[in-house]
Structures are given as C-alpha cells and as structure tokens.
Image (cartoon, helix red, strand yellow):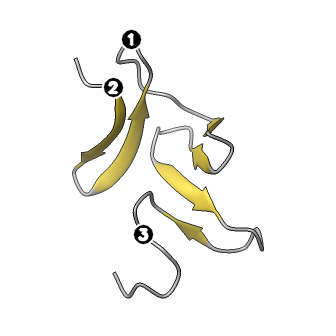
C-alpha cells in the first residue's frame, strides 16, 4: 500500500494513511489536491502553482 506523496505518470498525488487518494482538499496547509487528486502548491501570492518538490524559478 502506498501512502503520502506519490509521483504517478509525472504528476503528484497524496494518499492518506490507508492508501486512499485524497481529492479536493488541503494537505499540510500548503498543497491543494484537485478533484482528480493531482496536487498543486499555492504560493503566498496565491497566483502561482507548483507541484511538490518544485519551486518558483527552478526551470523544471
């Protein structure tokens, strides 16, 4: 069973302690997982979104 952040098909998803995909909710108050479970990171300016492990200006 996979838990926590999982990279699947080049996209990040979050599984709870039971391995259930989390959807349409905040994780750790920083990451938001969309209705399809794919995550985005809401930056302080609330305009730019980045997946876990990426940062603004990283070029990747």
Whole-angstrom CA distance, mark 2 to mark 1, is: 7 Å
Identify the mark nearer the N-term, 1 or 3: 1
In the image, 21 versus 52, the foreground residue is 52
Quickly name the residue at label 3.
54
Quickly name the residue at label 2.
3
Please tell me how crowded label 1 is: few (under 14), some (14-19), or many (20+) other residues with Cα within 10 Å: few
Name the residue at 41% across, 84% down.
58
Q: Quadrant of residue 34?
A: top right
Q: Secondary structure at mark 1?
A: loop
Name the residue at 53% across, 80% down.
56
Measuring from the top left, give residue 40's x and y in whole percent. Answer: 54, 56
On-image quarter of the C terminus: bottom left
- In the rendered view, tell whether residue 31 sits above or below residue 28: below
Name the residue at 77% across, 74% down.
45
Q: Secondary structure at mark 3?
A: loop
Query: Residue 44 got which mark?
Result: none
Q: Are marks 1 and 3 in contact (CB under 8 Å)?
A: no
Q: Are marks 3 and 2 in contact (CB under 8 Å)?
A: no
- In the rendered view, tell whether residue 57 sits above or below residue 38: below
Q: Is residue 2 left or right of residue 49?
A: left
Identify the mark nearer the N-term, 2 or 1: 2
Q: Quadrant of residue 42?
A: bottom right
Quickly name the residue at label 1.
18
Measuring from the top left, give residue 24's x and y in whole percent. Answer: 62, 35
Q: Is residue 28 left or right of residue 6?
A: right
């Amino acid at each position: 069973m996979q838990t926590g952040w999982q990279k699947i098909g080049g996209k990040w998803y979050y599984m709870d302690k039971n391995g259930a995909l989390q959807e349409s909710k905040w994780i750790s108050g920083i990451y938001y997982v969309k209705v399809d479970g794919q995550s985005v990171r809401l930056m302080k300016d609330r305009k730019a979104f980045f997946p876990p492990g990426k940062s603004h200006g990283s070029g990747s």
